[in-house]
Image: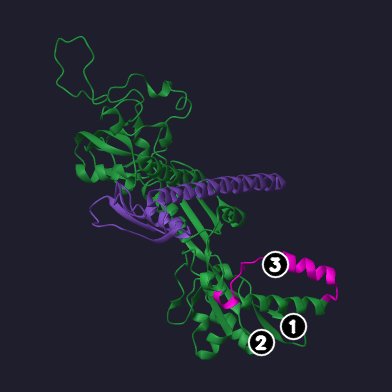
């Protein structure tokens, strides 16, 4: 142990002595001291855990990941697994059918960002990949209509399907969902709007013949899929038929005499290939804002501060004798517009805007194929699988 | 794929195909947490290649083992995140159903 530490220990010892005058408790205190100090001095702790949002630019935005970063101070910077387990917290703020907002506390941005990236680009969903256009006399071109169809969220659990590559690109009941769209606007009738509810699920697979029908062949003509059984006979789909998640998406408009007839094949894929397979409308996080009043802000200044903030972070409390004092009532709604520290050096000295580096407010908006909370657990599972892959490749 | 030397196994570059920042940055974080690591970093040599190179240099242990341990750590962290998250979601759902019942 260094002589410096010895000195600080004896100082603390003296302090406790003068405070309690009890030799037994002093001994207990000394025994409870760790040989390695686990806490940084407060000014370094602040720079390590907070981003300081100054008037011109944020400061100390990086996270200190290196385990030996504070070795010179005798402080261990590594996050041990049991330590992580103790400190990591999740608090759900909002959970609906389509979106979730939760606080993730005690995690490095490297991990939080990995989850976000996986949610957007690597959690699989089902999306329409191939269109067989039998007839299209509408004004919308084949390729534009096909693209629109591709973007429709399909209400089918992707975990029940396989990737088409696994079956050697053979389309069977395990990797393909077939929809039919056939709409016609009769002559002398008003124009009609084709919506996604017109997409009808074909549990038996494609109905379009893939080769010319021979006039005197008794066998059924070959189609674009080879289903061995009907999908609605499978236990997971009997009772809840597959359909687009939203039934009111406008696909095209038809004038009198126009017609669209097509078949759409949906397959499993990931958002990295094409955004239509992304299971989230978006997934993002922000760091928790922290607003601190460094000095008492009173009377007219309190009023001014309250009016400066466009999102109402500050509030005013009465402290008696007709005097008022500003308080930080809603730091969470702070957007870091920095309006409160604008207006001269004196305001920068009164208010400190910070962000907590390891506290993430995570929001996931699902497109509907899977509930948002399931999406997040799937994302974490995918990261685990990636690690496993690396481990097996290295062994 | 590992690129290193047989005589000195404490430094190696690992090339992971079909991976990107997602795992490389997360693994770099866990590698940095390991006191045996003297240097670690990653690069994506070309944005069109689906490949990431992770460089690991250690104080003496085999770089391969250290990287494996880092992946193991990351996996355990993920497992903990998943169980904590599931628990919080369940708690939230429970409290919500109780609240809904109160309204009726």
Q: Is residue A151 left or right of residue A104?
A: left
Residue farthest along the right direction in this orientation = A22
The chain to which mark 1 is attached is: A
The chain to which mark 2 is attached is: A
Q: Is residue B53 above or below residue A14?
A: above
Q: Is residue B87 left or right of residue A186?
A: right
Query: Percent from the top left, x then y, of residue A139?
Result: 20, 45
Give neighbour class at mark 2: few <14, some 14-19, many 20+ (Cα, 10 Å). some
Where are the magenta residues, as a range? A20-44
* Residue A312 visible in this rendered orientation of the protein: no
Q: Mark 1 — residue? A: A319
Q: Is residue A180 above or below residue A295?
A: above
Give neighbour class at mark 3: few <14, some 14-19, many 20+ (Cα, 10 Å). few
Residue A21 part of the magenta-drawn span: yes
Q: Is residue A39 left or right of residue A15?
A: left
Q: Does the residue at mark 2 contact the one at mark 1 (Cβ under 8 Å)?
A: yes
Q: Does the residue at mark 3 contact the one at mark 2 (Cβ under 8 Å)?
A: no
Real-space Cα separation, disc 3 to disc 2, in angstroms: 42 Å
Real-space Cα separation, disc 2 to disc 1, in angstroms: 9 Å
């Amino acid at each position: 142990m260094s002589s410096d530490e010895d000195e600080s220990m004896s100082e603390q010892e003296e302090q406790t002595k003068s405070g309690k005058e009890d030799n037994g408790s002093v001994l207990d205190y000394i025994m409870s001291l760790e040989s390695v100090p686990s806490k940084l001095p407060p000014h370094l702790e602040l720079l390590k855990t907070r981003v300081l949002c100054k008037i011109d630019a944020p400061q100390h935005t990086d996270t200190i990941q290196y385990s030996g970063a504070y070795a010179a101070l005798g402080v261990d910077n590594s996050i041990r697994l049991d330590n992580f387990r103790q400190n990591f917290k999740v608090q759900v703020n909002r959970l609906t059918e389509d979106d979730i907002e939760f606080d993730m506390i005690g995690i490095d941005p490297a991990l939080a960002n990995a989850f976000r990236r996986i949610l957007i680009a690597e959690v699989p969903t089902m999306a329409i990949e191939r269109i067989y256009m039998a007839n299209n006399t509408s004004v919308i071109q084949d390729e534009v209509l096909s693209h629109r169809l591709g973007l429709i969220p399909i209400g089918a659990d992707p975990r029940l399907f396989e990737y088409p590559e696994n079956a050697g690109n053979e389309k069977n009941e395990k990797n393909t969902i077939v929809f039919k769209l056939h709409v016609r606007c009769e002559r002398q009738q008003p124009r009609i709007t084709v919506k996604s509810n017109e997409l009808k699920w074909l549990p038996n697979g494609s109905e379009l013949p893939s080769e010319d029908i021979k006039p005197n062949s008794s066998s059924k003509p070959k189609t674009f899929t080879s289903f061995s059984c009907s999908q609605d006979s499978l236990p997971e789909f009997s009772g809840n038929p597959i359909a687009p998640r939203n039934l009111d998406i406008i696909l095209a408009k038809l004038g009198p005499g126009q017609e669209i007839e097509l078949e759409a094949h949906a397959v499993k894929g990931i958002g990295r290939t094409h955004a239509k397979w992304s299971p989230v409308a978006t997934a993002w996080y922000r760091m928790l804002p922290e607003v601190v009043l460094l000095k008492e802000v009173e009377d007219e200044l309190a009023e001014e501060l309250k009016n400066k903030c466009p999102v109402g972070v500050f509030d005013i409390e009465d402290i008696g004798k007709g005097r008022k004092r500003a308080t930080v009532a809603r730091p969470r709604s702070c957007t870091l517009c920095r309006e409160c520290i604008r207006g001269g050096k004196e305001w920068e000295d009164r208010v400190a805007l910070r962000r907590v580096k390891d506290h993430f407010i995570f929001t996931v908006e699902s497109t509907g194929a899977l509930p948002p909370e399931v999406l997040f657990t799937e994302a974490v599972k995918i990261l685990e699988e990636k690690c496993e892959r690396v481990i097996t490749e290295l062994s | 794929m590992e690129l290193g030397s047989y005589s000195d196994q404490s430094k190696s570059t690992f090339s992971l195909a079909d991976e990107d920042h997602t795992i490389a940055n997360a693994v770099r974080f866990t590698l940095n947490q390991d006191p045996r690591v003297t240097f670690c970093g990653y690069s994506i040599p070309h944005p069109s290649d689906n490949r990431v190179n992770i460089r690991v240099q250690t104080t003496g242990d085999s770089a391969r083992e250290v990287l494996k341990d880092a992946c193991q750590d990351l996996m355990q962290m993920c497992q903990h995140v998943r169980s904590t998250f599931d628990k919080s979601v369940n708690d939230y759902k429970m409290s919500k159903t109780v609240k809904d019942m109160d309204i009726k």
